[in-house]
Image (spheres, grey):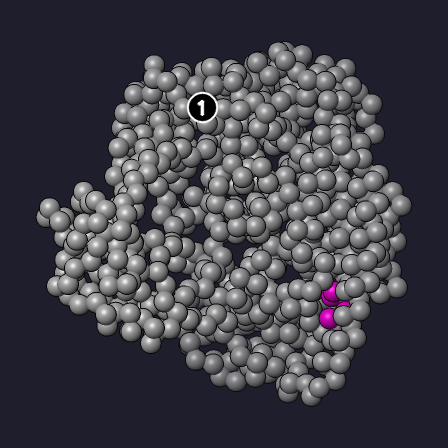
């Protein structure tokens, strides 16, 4: 019997159907010589510090660096304690029984770094010795599944991928566990403060941009703008920036409406604008955030659903290219879109059939584990609006990417207005090419270059050097410098992709992807973690750090753990390990040395924090009702004991029965057992009354 291990039940069911297995059992599907079983994501994890004997948080324990990492069944947190996940244990037992009877294992977890780790952790935890092969497919269509099973890869071909995944997992454990305990212990009475290898530099990017924006002081500058007309075509020309008002006023005083200005030179330049590259996950998430306001996590979830519906290829890809083998069949996909897509996409698709296609997105050398996102030949069934939006984005990008270049004539005219040089620009599109189908995602206004906007004209008349033009209008415009905008998820994803370097060019960004923060598959989860930690919040599309997030940032902003470039270098080394250029031992020695260094750095913060806390404390400390020495910290949404790290898990919402409790009433509730009479209290029955809240047996009721 061949045992196939998928990443989730739905995938196992699909594989079983295609391969003719129909007997549904408890935890697997059997038939036709196969048993199709599954994980629920990570069934096995790295052991917690408690497994190595570190049951309490103590400075003397740090740094915690296991001599040999061990694996354990997935744990869940209940009543402040880590306990075994009963569902995970049951499924592991099912997999073990199947492996005991197996002649071969087929690995069918997601074809990527995380999917490989999910399988290998199960395999090594169960101590299996059964040989295994790898199913490596880029779409879930029946055709792709059958071809994949016919061309299974040797499991050993993915050993370097596993070592890269294992190193990523162990380095995240070492830095996350030690840095979190060190900063929490150092900060003393600030509650649990979580740090991480990728989450902390990501938080640093959000906070530094927010503070830069908040502290920005606009500087005034001036521009002289004159209006002209020729051949019934009106246009404007604008000066460069003038920093000082008096200089600008003196310059504009020399020019009068009705006087003449001379054309100094006319430069016409043909520009070829290449179509955009195909989507990878990160660029899809960026555009979906700009266009629809979807979070990175939401876009990934929608794309994963479309993949499991078989209508798009593997979404967690980091490549924006396809290989020649895929390109050979691309016309079939355009025929498919011509028959099934919405009319705007179908019309362009019909034009591409039989045409000479642009091959900018075709490069075998730039395809990583998976090629760029494409639709499949599967006909889409009914979809909810969000799924339709993402599907259409991928389909539209496909027709754009293989369309002709856009040809523009850009004319720049330099005009002398009584000693002041003015510039006018005009653009004429000679061949729309890919822009004919483009529904471009517009950048927010603050991201646009105002200088270029000032010079741009919808149309310019035919002008020649030495020509004289009458000045019809004149304006001295005051402008202000603008701060770089607060990060949105779109701009943050872009910054994570390039370790904070501002790179506009698609191909240059692709070249840097191996040293970005995280991977396309993990960036959404990193951002979600920051929300869960109460480090950031949303203000429409903007990402705003919370008070807690800024506290953490201010504590670590000068420490190496917040440095974007350092984490980017680690990602690069993990990619090199995957290519067998760096060994596990060398990389992990570096990480262990770094862990010891950063732990020491963070523990030294205790001195500066202690000095700060020697100052007079704020009045009104609230005693923790669960543990005697603890005090309650008030956050925006919750109140929590500051002895979390010492084992007290007391936490209570700030909004209770529809009323936000300020410090005074929270103190009354937790120390005296009841608040004063509050207005607008909501009862269990849904009535609104004026009444006190009562705290008994760690439950809150209306008094």
Q: Would residue 89 be visible to someone looking at this image?
A: no
Based on the picture, tell me whether residue 149 belongs to the magenta stretch. no
The quadrant in which the N terminus is found is: top right
Residue of label 1: 359
Q: Would residue 611 be visible to someone looking at this image?
A: yes
Based on the picture, tell me whether residue 184 belongs to the magenta stretch. yes
Which residue is the extreme one toward the left?
Answer: 232
Residue depicted at x 59% and y 25%: 365
Q: Residues within 10 Å of mark 1 (few under 14, many from 20)?
A: some
Q: Secondary structure at mark 1?
A: loop
Q: Give the image location of residue 295, x and y in percent.
A: 48, 49
Q: Give the image location of residue 168, x and y in percent.
A: 72, 42
Q: Which residues are magenta?
A: 183-187
Nearest to the observer: residue 270 or residue 502 = 270
Vertical comparison of 630 with 268: above or below:
below
Vertical comparison of 696 with 168: above or below:
below
Vertical comparison of 324 with 449: above or below:
above
Magenta stretch: helix, strand or loop mostly: helix
Which residue is the extreme one toward the front?
Answer: 466
Residue depicted at x 40% and y 33%: 274
Residue 350: which quarter of the image?
top left
């Amino acid at each position: 019997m061949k045992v196939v291990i998928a990443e989730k039940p739905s995938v196992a069911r699909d594989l079983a159907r295609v391969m003719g297995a129909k007997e549904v059992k408890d935890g697997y599907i059997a038939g036709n010589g196969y048993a199709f079983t599954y994980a629920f994501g990570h069934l096995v994890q790295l052991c917690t510090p408690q497994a190595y004997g570190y049951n309490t948080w103590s400075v003397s324990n740090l740094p915690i660096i296991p001599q040999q990492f061990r694996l354990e069944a997935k744990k869940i947190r209940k009543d402040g304690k880590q306990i075994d996940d009963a569902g995970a244990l049951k499924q592991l037992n099912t997999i073990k029984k199947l492996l005991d009877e197996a002649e071969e294992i087929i690995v069918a977890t997601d074809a990527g770094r995380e999917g490989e780790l999910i399988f290998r952790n199960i395999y090594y935890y169960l101590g299996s010795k059964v040989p295994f092969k790898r199913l490596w497919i880029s779409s879930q269509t029946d055709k792709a599944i059958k071809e994949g099973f016919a061309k299974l890869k040797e499991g050993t071909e993915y050993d370097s991928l596993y070592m890269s995944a294992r190193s990523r997992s162990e380095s995240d454990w070492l830095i996350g566990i030690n840095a979190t305990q060190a900063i929490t212990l150092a900060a003393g009475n600030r509650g649990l403060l979580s740090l991480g290898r990728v989450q902390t530099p990501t938080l640093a990017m959000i906070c530094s941009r927010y503070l830069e924006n908040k502290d920005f002081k606009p500087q005034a500058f001036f521009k002289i703008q004159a209006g002209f007309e020729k051949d019934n075509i009106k246009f404007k020309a604008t000066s460069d920036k003038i920093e000082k008002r008096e200089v600008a006023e003196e310059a504009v005083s020399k020019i009068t409406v009705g006087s003449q200005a001379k054309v100094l030179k006319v430069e016409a330049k043909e520009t070829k604008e290449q179509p955009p590259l195909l989507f990878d996950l990160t660029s899809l998430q960026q555009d979906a955030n700009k266009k629809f306001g979807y979070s990175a996590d939401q876009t990934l979830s929608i794309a994963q659903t479309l993949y499991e519906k078989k209508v798009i290829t593997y979404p967690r890809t980091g490549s924006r290219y396809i290989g020649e083998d895929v390109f050979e069949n691309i016309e079939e996909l355009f025929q498919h879109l011509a028959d099934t897509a919405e009319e705007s996409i179908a019309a362009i698709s019909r034009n591409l059939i039989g045409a000479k296609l642009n091959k900018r997105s075709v490069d075998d050398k730039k395809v990583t584990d998976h090629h760029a996102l494409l639709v499949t030949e599967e006909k889409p069934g009914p979809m909810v609006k969000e799924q339709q939006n993402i599907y259409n984005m991928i389909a539209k990008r496909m027709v754009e990417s293989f369309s002709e270049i856009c040809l523009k004539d850009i004319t720049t005219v330099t005009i002398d207005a009584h000693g002041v040089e003015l510039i006018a620009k005009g653009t004429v599109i000679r061949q729309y090419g890919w822009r004919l189908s483009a529904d471009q995602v517009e950048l927010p206004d603050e991201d646009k270059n105002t200088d270029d906007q000032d010079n741009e004209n919808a149309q310019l008349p035919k002008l020649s050097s030495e020509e004289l033009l009458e000045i019809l209008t004149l304006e001295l415009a005051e402008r202000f410098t603008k701060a770089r905008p607060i990060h949105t998820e779109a701009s943050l994803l872009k910054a994570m992709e390039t370790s904070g370097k501002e790179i506009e060019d698609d191909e240059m960004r692709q070249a840097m992807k191996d040293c970005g923060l995280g991977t396309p598959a993990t960036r959404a989860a990193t951002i979600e973690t920051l929300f869960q930690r109460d480090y950031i919040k949303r203000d429409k599309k903007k990402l705003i750090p919370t008070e807690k997030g800024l506290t953490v940032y201010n504590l670590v902003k000068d420490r190496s753990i917040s440095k974007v470039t350092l984490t980017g270098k680690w990602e690069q080394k993990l990619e090199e390990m995957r290519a067998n250029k760096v060994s596990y031992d060398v990389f992990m020695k570096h990480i262990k040395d770094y862990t010891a260094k950063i732990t020491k750095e963070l523990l030294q913060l205790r001195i500066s924090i202690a000095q700060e806390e020697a100052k007079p404390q704020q009045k009104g400390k609230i005693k923790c009702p669960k543990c005697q020495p603890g005090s309650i910290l008030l956050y925006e949404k919750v109140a929590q004991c500051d002895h979390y790290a010492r084992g007290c898990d007391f936490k209570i919402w700030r909004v209770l029965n529809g009323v936000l409790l300020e410090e005074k009433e929270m103190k009354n509730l937790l120390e005296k057992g009841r608040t004063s009479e509050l207005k607008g209290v909501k009862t269990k029955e849904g009535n609104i009354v004026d009444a006190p809240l009562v705290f008994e047996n760690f439950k809150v009721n209306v008094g």
